[in-house]
């Protein structure tokens, strides 16, 4: 079985999650709670699918080394470091934020979402950037 297409799948899932997060933000700002709930649930599902796909890929392939040198390597490593550190907290932030909403604890949900959304969005967008730099840029 070939796993070579999974990085692209992962980037699409990250990009989709990012788009859904932005849509969810606009929906809640417009007062459309039910649409917000559905879109944020879809963003969470995309992120879960991403995580499963990512773990399967790296369990089979291992780590992939960034080949470029110089300034672009420094930029890549800075993005990768911040992405990795924040990616470790996103599942906890997302689960607790969703938990608060499902329990009707909307003030707690809103307060945590103000932190969770930008972190989750940053991780999703930088996931796509890392993919582009690692698999699509030619040096």
Image (tube, rainbow, N blue to C red):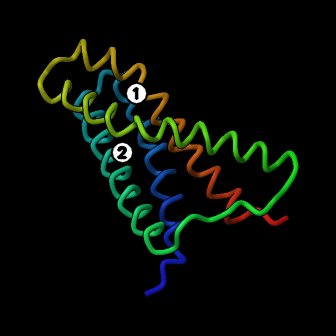
x 24%, y 32%: residue:
98
| First reached walking from the N terminus: tag 1 or tag 2 | 2
Q: Nearer the viewer, mark 1 or mark 2?
A: 1
Say which quarter of the image contains residue 88.
Answer: top left
3, above or below 137, in the image: below
Horizontal and vertical percent position of residue 73: 79, 50
- Residue at the spot of label 2: 43
Q: Could you say whether the residue bearing mark 1 is in a helix, strand or loop?
A: helix
132, above or below 42, in the image: below
Q: Please tell me how crowded label 1 is: few (under 14), some (14-19), or many (20+) other residues with Cα within 10 Å.
A: many
Name the foreground residue: 115 vs 28: 115
Quarter of the figure that contains the N terminus: bottom left
- The span from disc 1 to disc 2 (Cα, nearest Å) is 13 Å
x 37%, y 52%: residue:
46
Quarter of the figure that contains the C terminus: bottom right
Horizontal and vertical percent position of residue 42: 31, 47
- Image mark for residue 81: none
**Number of callouts:** 2
Q: Is residue 128 left or right of residue 66?
A: left
x 71%, y 56%: residue:
133
Pointer 1 with pointer 2, Cβ within 8 A? no
- Residue at the spot of label 1: 116
């Amino acid at each position: 079985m070939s796993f070579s297409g999974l990085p692209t799948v992962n980037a699409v899932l990250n990009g989709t999650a990012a788009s859904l997060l932005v849509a969810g933000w606009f929906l809640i700002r417009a007062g459309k709670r039910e649409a917000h709930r559905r879109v944020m649930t879809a963003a969470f599902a995309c992120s879960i699918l991403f995580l499963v796909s990512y773990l399967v890929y790296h369990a089979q392939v291992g780590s992939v080394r960034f080949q470029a040198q110089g300034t672009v390597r420094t930029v890549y490593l800075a993005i990768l470091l911040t992405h990795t550190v924040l990616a470790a907290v996103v599942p906890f932030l997302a689960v607790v934020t969703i938990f608060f909403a499902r329990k009707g604890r909307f003030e707690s949900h809103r307060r945590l979402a103000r932190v969770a959304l930008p972190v989750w969005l940053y991780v999703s967008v930088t996931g796509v950037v890392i993919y582009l730099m690692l698999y699509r840029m030619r040096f």
